[in-house]
Amino acid sequence: MAASDPSNKPLQNLDEWEDFVKARYAEEPPPPAPVDKPFVATSPNKKQEEFRNYRAEARPTVKEFYRLNHTYQTRDFVLQKKRQYLSREKRTMGVWEAMEYLNTLVDDSDPDTDLSQIEHLLQTAETIRADGHPRWFILTGLVHDLGKILCLWGEPQWAVVGDTFPVGCAFSDRVVFPEFFAFNPDSRVPEYQARTGIYEENCGLDGVDMSWGHDEYIYHVAKDYLPEEALYMLRYHSFYAAHKEGEYDYLMNDHDKEMFRWVKAFSSYDLYSKSAERPDIKKLKPYYQELINESFPAKLNW
C-alpha cells in the first residue's frame, strides 16, 4: 500500500492510539518501579463498574488502524523495513534537532489537545524527573517517541505506532483485536503457526523480529549511547502483550525477564504522564540539552 493511500491514516492523530491504550489498561495499577522512589499513579481510582470495555468503546478509526496493523505487519514487511531504515541514512541531526523535526508532525484535527510533540516529550521526562529517577531514565523519557519521525518519511500510521508483537511465530490472542490477524498472510505460513515458530524456546528477545514501528527504530538510533535498561524501555515500551498481559514469556530468556522490570516501570510514565499543563520549553531546554550532551554526540545518523 502506498503511503499516500488515505487508508494508511485511519487515526485522526497518533495520540488517538495512545489514548486507546491508556483506556484499555487504566484499570490496572501501575507496577512498582525497580528504583528507590516508586511511581505514584496519578490516574483516579475506578470502581469495578467503571472499567472501560475497550472493544465496545474503541472508535471505528482505532479498529480500522488495528485491522491495517495486524494485516500488513508480516515478517517479510518487518525485514524489509529493517533493510530500509537500520542503515540510518535518512538524515543527520542532534537529539534536540530531532525533537524540533518531530514537532513538524502537526495534526490540526486533534480536538483534545493543542500540545506540540516537544511538549509531549517534555511532559514524560518531567514526570520521571519529578519522581527522582536517574538522569538516564529521564533522558529515556525524553527520546522514547522520537521514532515517530518515521511518519515524516511517508510511513503509514500502522507502521509507526501500535502495540508491538513478535512476527515469525503464532500470534497471541492477548494482543488487542487478535481477530484481525486472520487477514495477515503469515497466519497461513505453516512454520509460523507454532507458538515459538521459527524461534527456539527461551531464545531471548534480541533474536526475535518484532513488528515494525517507532520502538524498534529509536532503539537502533540510541543503542550505542544509553544503558541497557534504557534500551529495553525504548525497544519494548509498546509490547503490551508482554509487559501488561504476560504473554510471550516462552520467547524470553532470564535476562529479558529481569530487564522487563524496567519496561514495566517505564510504562507507567508512558501511559500516565500526559496533562493539560504546558511545559515551558525555553526554560527547560538548557537542562535537557545538558542531559542530552551527557549521553549523545552532537549529531546522530537517523
Image (tube, helix red, strand yellow):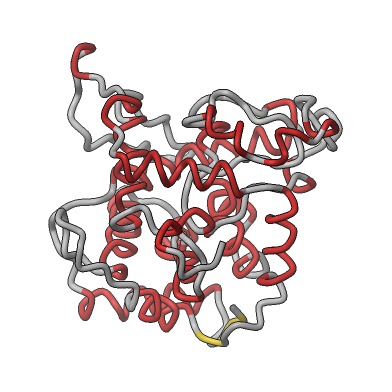
**Quadrant assignment for the N terminus:** bottom right
Residue located 18% across and 29% down the image:
44
Q: Against 139, is 301 above or below?
A: below
Q: How many labels does the image show?
A: 0
- Residue 244 vs residue 56: left or right? right
**Quadrant assignment for the C terminus:** bottom right
Residue located 25% across and 69% down the image:
116
Q: Say which quarter of the image contains residue 115.
A: bottom left
Residue 244 on image: x %, y %:
48, 29
Q: Against 32, is 162 above or below?
A: below
Residue 291 on image: x %, y %:
43, 73
Residue located 45% across and 39% down the image:
265
Foreground: 154 or 211?
A: 154
Q: Say which quarter of the image contains residue 142.
A: bottom left
- Residue 107 vs residue 299: left or right? left
Residue located 79% across and 25% down the image:
194
Foreground: 137 or 20?
A: 20
Residue 186 on image: x %, y %:
72, 39
Q: Say which quarter of the image contains residue 199.
A: top right
Q: Against 188, is 161 above or below?
A: below
- Residue 172 vs residue 83: left or right? left
Residue 246 on image: x %, y %:
57, 24
